Amino acid sequence: MLRFLLSRIGLLIPTFIGVSIVAFSFIRLLPGDPVLLMAGERGLSPERHAELLKQFGFDRPIWEQYWDYLLGILQGDLGISIVTKKPVVAEFFTLFPATVELSLCAIVLAVMIGIPIGIIAAVKRGSFFDHTVMTTALIGYSMPIFWWGLLLIILFAGILQWTPVSGRISLIYFFPPVTGFMLIDSLLSGQDGAFRSAVSHLILPTIVLATIPLAVIARQTRSAMLEVLSEDYVRTARAKGLSPFRVVSVHALRNAMIPVITTIGLQVGVLLAGAILTETIFSWPGIGKWMVESISRRDYPVVQGALLMVASIIMLVNLAVDMLYGLINPRIRYAR
Amino acid sequence: MSDTSRAETPKRSAEAEVLAEFWHYFSENRGAVIGLFVFVALVLIAIFAPLVAPHSPTQQYRDALLQPPVWADNGTATFLLGTDAVGRDILSRLIYGARFSLFIGVVVVTLSLTIGISLGLVAGYVGGKPDTFIMRVMDVILSFPSLLLALVLVAILGPGLMNAMIAIALILQPHFVRLTRAAVLSEKNRDYVTAARVAGAGPLRLMFRTILPNCMAPLIVQATLSFSNAILDAAALGFLGMGAQPPTPEWGTMLAEAREFILRAPWVVTFPGLAILITVLAINLMGDGLRDALDPKLKRS
């Protein structure tokens, strides 16, 4: 297992270097003077310009600049935001819990609904339920989620007035963030109705963000289940006289889950891309909205840092999924 | 279906036979046939947009701002789906928007297919260091969320439809590289390839004429998926203000312009999104049918 882990980490290093080159090149590829882009000041005097040029190191050879950038990353230095003048890393970790909270709720919703309906659809292959579920899943998979979010706002926040339009919690509640997760913080605060308010703010964004992963997981579960159900060992289990429920839930499910877990792991990228749109629609103060705003505010150090952080997180999650995969399926572990 | 074609052409060529067999499997999937019909209808609407559209997509009717659709209380038959905030006919804008979406799909798929297949062929056929290098670069592209990388690329290139298409093509092509490479690796040591090499075929001929046609099935399915992804991503970029710029009647851009009216005039928001959903759904339905028809594993069962 350790060798497997080490070989996977070995594969990650070149990818991480590639990602850092992309983030490093970003500022230098933008049209315009990089000093002005990084400083974000207008009307620089030539002396100030020269000073900043030296400070940012743009006067030195490009590989030296990259080396400095890489050393900075390893020490947790991702630059300073032009707009807020705060370190990018600090801002990232202030906003990150909001995105994690939303993404976790979305993936839990997607898994809790997607896997059961995928299994039932496979067991009742060709039935009315199967057709309905698969049609709905394909619609979900084809959904422009930014439009879906607006529709839900029109219906539930506008016409029915069941949920609020945007934000994480009603403005009447105020308490210092402890964990950064609004659901937990609102409970800890002990204020009446705070948790309720946090939940009602979370419902619509969660549904929107869960839509595509839910559709993908349901489709993948169904096809993995169908494949396993046609295996000889399942027929043997049936022939032994085991109950259909036991055959499906014990014998088939375990093997059918292997590709499904990979699919769930792959949803992390989908979730983070979806978070960009979902957070923008619902004014959810997470990293997705932060990145879009930073691009339009030309806060390029933030964009650069966020690019690196997001890619690194996806790489780490994929590594974790690989490990999990190796744990469940020994064939993978000993294959190479 | 195949019976009638047999009656018409008693001596069918091998190609026609393949096509007939393909259609047989494709037409078994009802969803795929529906998707195909919707898609053909969209293509026709896009081509004949000036003839079909009741109004110009940019004409502003100042006396009919935010007019509701015809079935609502204040709707008129002049503007079947109502008008937007500056009095433009929504139906006409949607019809012209079909042109943009299909154009985006075609350009992006062509670009990413060409680049992806070429890189994949080189990686799979040549192997060694070029292979490692190409695949590592693809890994890097795939480790970013696609929409984020597209946003950043557009920030570098500048907002606009053309740059959005280039960015989307770049983020979609690693899938083609991986598929092509995998297919080439499984094909290149087959006897027919060795035979062609012994017969004196050069590397380019081996790559493009001998091996590539036998790797087409997964690529065609992936191309359909990429077509719908391209439309979705371009609309998302338009929605975020980084794609096609107003007053272009691109569906995502229309949604962005309509956002502030969602509670006052829901129809301005509803129809462009519905157009995106129907188009993407039709293409994905076709994609499912193509996969069933081209996948030999499923054919046997």
Image (cartoon, coloured by chain):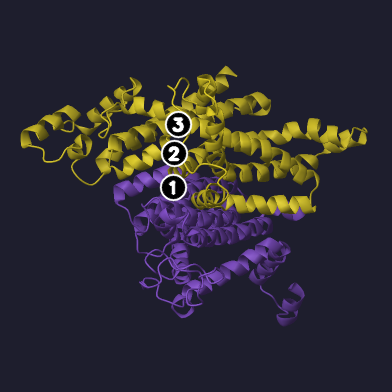
Chain colours: A yellow, B purple
Callout 1: SS: helix
Q: Is residue B44 visible?
A: yes
Who's the residue at 87% across and 37% down the image? A244
**Is there a contact, CB below 8 Å, between mark 2 and mark 1?**
yes
Tell me the kind of residue under disc 2: Phe
Side (left or right) of A227 relative to B249: right
Query: On the same chain: label 1 and label 3?
Result: no
Q: Residue furthest top?
A: A2
Query: Closer to the observer: label 1 or label 3?
Result: 3
Question: In this rendering, which labeled residue sits more in front, label 3 or label 2?
Answer: 3
> Contact (CB < 8 A) between labels 3 and 2?
no
Separation of disc 3 and disc 2 at Cα? 38 Å
Residue picked out by circle 3: A172
Give the CA distance from mark 1 to mark 3.
43 Å
Relative vertical location of residue B83 with respect to residue A7 in this rendering, above or below: below
Chain designation of label 3: A
Residue A7 point in image, percent of width and height: 52, 24
Residue B144, numbered circle: 2
